[in-house]
Image (spheres, rainbow, N blue to C red):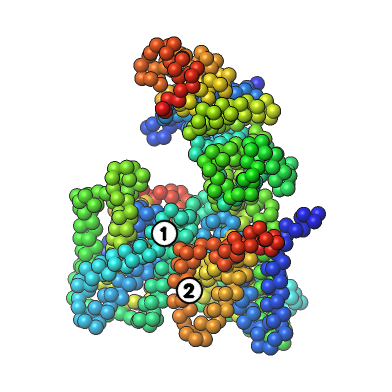
């Protein structure tokens, strides 16, 4: 039994970090907004890393899931806010719609794109993202390029006071929850057959098949998990919090870039990596936005290149190497 | 009932016939060698047997089941294990994890947990003598260690049939003899059939297999008792380009264990 | 009436398709030789666009002059990125090169923004227009098309008649075989990458001859995606496949737009873009080696 629990020790530093962030944000005046931003990046990194870190596949179209999550929540609020008796159930419906849309697209993508390798996979994912965005705009569904504005509907259903709480606290709080959930799932996968199967996939997919591993199944599990978590972040941090959605704002590949930076900074395939990466990225973005607004990416683009060439393991990868053989080893994954 | 049965299996790549109407039966617990020069279709035959690609014609039966169109990952749990000519370790995982992956998705797939698999792995790591390297990343092993790790990984799958692709290439005579002894031992202990594919090293085949199938240009040349097969004039011709003094071939190549690479 | 319109639009599509073809050859060449998909491809097209714009507006030079300038600048950029970054990633896992080229693209965008700002710009190269029975075409578009054909043909002869060109083709066909035959693969990698980038920057010039407006630091992303579709259509590793696929793509794009415009209640432009990506998606599903590939 002790053995089983000790296998989950690496979650301790991750949860501790989230707890400290939460406490700082909750009790120190004026800090909540920044902490929420950091949680957003940690959650996205953690979610993206489940697929990318474990399989070695790069999903450049990851933002599709975040966008569909946003749309799900937006549709839920727009159509169901008229039934006032649903109460908070409106948001539950929104979240369910978000997860439904994301799983639909994840399964479609998995069916087609996961049969492709490397570059072809990356291209196909971008293709889906763009195809979906322009289809929404072109066929004028869900408001087309004008998107949906439902802040008013939200106000009507919940009243000013509750909406204020929902958008300034609960939306961000649920991002914390998603980040923690993502960390837990990632850890759980790493320690279960899924993790072993995906290690084999990452290293040598053909040999993995010969070893009896249903590679498509395990890749799909990771892909779906990663996508659903992303959809959750979208539903809460964009849909509920902002009260509007425009296709041109949500299907933007730059958000995938941010996931990439966060994960690479921290260490791809590690558990603590996205947290460290999210903190470094979030803080420096916040800071750079003050000292040289609009040029954060000018700094980050060369950093990505340098990491890839010089330190592909990221901060946590290096840390793990340092701590190998010490008592602390079991806490870092 | 034979464990593995091939019926007129043919595999083409474009116009090239890589495997040409090969039929073969292997009984449970048998040790058989497949011999043939480079390009004779041995590896392709292996790939057809364990499902890397389906054959154009013919059927493959395993344990009485028609597995001709079954994907590779469904064959391993039935009891088909395999090692590769050039070892293919999962480089970033430890030796222990590599071997555990074998246990996890082999014939015991539904019965073992991750912890069980790691225990099974320990047993086979000990069996192949890799204990000191257990926690090393598999990618950092030497080529021979990688080969041993692959054997442990395949054995941890608890297969009924083990396909070994050039297990002894690049080894010195002593290592070959050790390997032959080792394979015979595990064959008896684990009660598995072993198909060992060998390109050149007659010494290994002679010591190891009770039966040999010789392939040439994709087709089955002969399938007979080892001594008979390796002294057959047709086999000698395939290897030397011309039929030669049978006794010379015998003494120089087979009995003395000369490697034809040298 | 509709047929005249369709024929007119298809003519424009064919001309644009030639430029698309050229704009994709670099992507295919780089993938063919070093097996790297340049995810920052479109940003090099953007560089070409700004070269043209700057030369035209500040120095008053015709876009035709920009063509060789863009080629040289592009090759210089290509060599620079190859020796600083790509060289180290050739044997690394595929995802590293995807991420690196992606970051490269962003770096170019941000540098362009730093220098030129984020506004949309354009220029007016008044070289008249030609009137056909079905449509009227600005001469600049005709020149862009002719330029693309000439460059593609030149490349064709260079590949098939020169020693260096043959060596590059040998590496595309069979990497290891080429090494055995005494080709200096390291140099071929560098040169091909540089030529690939050079071609791409150069195609940016021709594209602005075709569409002289909308020049801004972020214009490249869309072209990367279009180039993917075209490259996959053409078989991904073949620069000539890419050129012909470009022609086909230009025709489909303009043809589809004409037809979508007839459907009431939809926005034809985004729908056309969407179609391109669904095409890509299903193409990858059915025949990942491309329609024109082997």
- Badge 2 marks a residue whose secondary structure is helix
How many residues crowd around disc 2 within 10 Å: few (fewer than 14), some, or many (20 or more)?
Answer: many
Between C129 and B133, the one nearer to me in the picture: B133
Q: Is residue B9 above or below residue A280?
A: above
| Circles 2, 1 touching at the beta carbon (< 8 Å) | no
Between B127 and B190, the one nearer to me in the picture: B127
Location of the N terminus of chain A (image quadrant): bottom right
Location of the C terminus of chain A (image quadrant): bottom right
Q: Chain of mark 2?
A: A
Q: Quadrant of residue C243?
A: bottom left
Residue at 44% across, 60% down: C97
Between A96 and A196, the one nearer to me in the picture: A196
Report, in whole angstroms, how far the alpha carbon at label 2 lies from the one at label 1: 20 Å
Q: Which numbered marker is on residue C88?
A: 1
Return the x and y of residue C112 as percentages of the image width and height: 37, 77
Return the x and y of residue A164 as percentages of the image width and height: 68, 85
Q: Is residue C131 above or below residue B184?
A: below
Residue at 57% across, 43% down: A209
- Badge 1 marks a residue whose secondary structure is helix
Same chain, marks 2 and 1? no
Residue on which the image places disc 2: A300
Q: Chain of mark 1?
A: C
How many residues crowd around disc 1 within 10 Å: few (fewer than 14), some, or many (20 or more)?
Answer: some
Return the x and y of residue C287 as percentages of the image width and height: 43, 48
Q: Is residue B165 above or below residue A172?
A: above
Q: Which numbered marker is on residue B101?
A: none
Residue B224 visible in the snapshot: no
Residue at 48% across, 78% down: A296
């Amino acid at each position: 039994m002790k053995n089983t629990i000790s296998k989950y020790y690496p979650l301790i530093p991750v949860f501790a970090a989230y707890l400290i962030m939460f406490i700082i944000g909750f009790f120190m005046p004026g800090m909540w907004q920044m902490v929420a931003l950091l949680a957003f990046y940690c959650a996205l990194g953690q979610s993206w890393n489940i697929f990318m870190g474990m399989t070695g596949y790069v999903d450049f179209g990851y933002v599709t899931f975040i966008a569909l999550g946003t749309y799900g929540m937006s549709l839920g609020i727009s159509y169901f806010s008229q039934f006032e008796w649903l109460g908070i159930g409106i948001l539950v419906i929104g979240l369910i719609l978000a997860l439904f849309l994301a799983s639909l697209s994840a399964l479609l993508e998995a069916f087609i794109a996961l049969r492709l390798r490397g570059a072809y996979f990356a291209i196909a994912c971008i293709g889906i993202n763009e195809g979906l965005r322009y289809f929404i705009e072109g066929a004028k569904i869900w408001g087309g390029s004008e998107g949906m504005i439902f802040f008013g509907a939200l106000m009507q259903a919940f009243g000013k006071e509750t909406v204020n709480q929902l958008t300034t606290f609960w939306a961000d709080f649920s991002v914390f929850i998603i980040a923690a959930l993502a960390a837990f799932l990632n850890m759980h996968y790493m320690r279960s057959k899924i993790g072993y199967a995906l290690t084999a996939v990452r290293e040598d997919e053909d040999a993995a098949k010969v070893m009896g591993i249903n590679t498509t199944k395990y890749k799909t599990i990771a892909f779906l998990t990663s996508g659903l978590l992303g959809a959750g972040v979208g539903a809460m941090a964009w849909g509920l919090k902002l009260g509007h959605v425009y296709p041109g704002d949500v299907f933007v590949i730059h958000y995938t870039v941010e996931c990439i930076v966060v994960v690479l900074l921290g260490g791809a395939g590690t558990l603590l990596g996205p947290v460290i990466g999210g903190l470094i990225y979030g803080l420096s973005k916040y800071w750079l936005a003050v000292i040289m607004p609009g040029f954060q990416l000018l700094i980050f683009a060369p950093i990505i290149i340098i990491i890839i060439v010089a330190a592909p393991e990221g901060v946590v990868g290096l840390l793990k190497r340092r701590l190998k053989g010490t008592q602390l080893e079991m806490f870092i994954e | 009932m034979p464990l593995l049965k091939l019926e007129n299996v043919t595999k083409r790549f474009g116009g090239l016939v890589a495997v040409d109407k090969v039929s073969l039966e292997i009984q449970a617990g048998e040790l058989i060698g497949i011999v043939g020069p480079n390009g004779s279709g041995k590896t392709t035959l292996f790939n057809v047997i364990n499902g890397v690609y389906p054959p154009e014609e013919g059927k493959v039966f395993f344990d009485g089941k028609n597995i001709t169109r079954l994907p590779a990952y469904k064959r391993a749990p039935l009891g088909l294990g395999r090692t590769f000519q050039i070892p293919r370790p999962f480089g970033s995982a430890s030796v222990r994890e590599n071997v555990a992956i074998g246990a996890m998705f082999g014939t015991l797939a539904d019965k073992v947990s991750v912890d069980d698999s790691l225990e099974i792995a320990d047993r086979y790591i000990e069996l192949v003598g890799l204990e000191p390297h257990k926690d090393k990343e598999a990618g950092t092993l030497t080529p021979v260690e990688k080969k041993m790790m692959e054997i442990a990984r395949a054995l941890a799958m608890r297969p009924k049939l083990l396909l070994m692709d050039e297990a002894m290439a690049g080894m010195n005579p002593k290592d070959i003899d050790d390997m032959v002894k080792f394979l015979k031992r595990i064959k008896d202990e684990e009660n598995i059939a072993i198909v060992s594919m060998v390109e050149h090293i007659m010494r290994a085949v002679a010591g190891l297999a009770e039966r040999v199938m010789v392939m040439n240009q994709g087709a089955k040349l002969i399938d007979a008792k080892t001594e008979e097969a390796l002294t057959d004039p047709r086999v000698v011709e395939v290897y030397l380009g011309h039929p030669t003094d049978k006794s010379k071939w015998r003494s120089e190549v087979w009995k003395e264990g000369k490697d034809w690479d040298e | 009436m509709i047929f005249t319109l369709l024929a007119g639009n298809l003519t424009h599509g064919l001309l644009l398709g030639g430029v698309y073809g050229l704009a994709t050859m670099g992507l295919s060449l780089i993938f063919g030789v070093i097996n790297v998909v340049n995810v920052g491809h479109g940003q090099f097209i953007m560089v070409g666009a700004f070269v043209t714009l700057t030369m035209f507006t500040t120095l008053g030079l015709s876009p035709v002059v920009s063509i060789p300038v863009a080629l040289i600048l592009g090759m210089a950029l290509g060599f620079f990125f190859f020796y600083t970054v790509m060289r180290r990633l050739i044997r690394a896992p595929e995802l590293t090169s995807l991420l690196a080229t992606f970051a490269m693209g962003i770096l170019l965008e941000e540098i362009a923004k730093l220098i030129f700002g984020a506004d949309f710009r354009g220029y007016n190269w008044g070289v008249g227009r030609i009137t056909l029975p079905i449509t009227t075409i600005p001469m600049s578009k005709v020149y862009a098309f002719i330029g693309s054909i000439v460059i593609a043909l030149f490349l064709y002869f260079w590949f098939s008649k020169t020693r260096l060109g043959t060596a590059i083709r040998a590496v595309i066909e069979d990497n290891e075989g080429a090494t055995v035959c005494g080709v200096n693969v390291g140099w071929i990698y560098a040169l091909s990458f540089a030529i690939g980038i050079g071609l791409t920057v150069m195609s940016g010039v021709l594209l602005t001859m075709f569409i002289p407006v909308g020049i801004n630091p972020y214009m490249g992303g869309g072209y990367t995606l279009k180039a993917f579709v075209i490259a996959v259509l053409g078989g991904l590793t073949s620069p000539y496949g890419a050129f012909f696929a470009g022609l086909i793509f230009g025709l489909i794009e303009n043809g589809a737009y004409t037809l979508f415009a007839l459907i009431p209640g939809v926005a034809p432009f985004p729908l056309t873009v969407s179609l391109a990506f669904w095409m890509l998606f299903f193409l990858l599903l059915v025949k990942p080696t491309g329609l024109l590939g082997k």
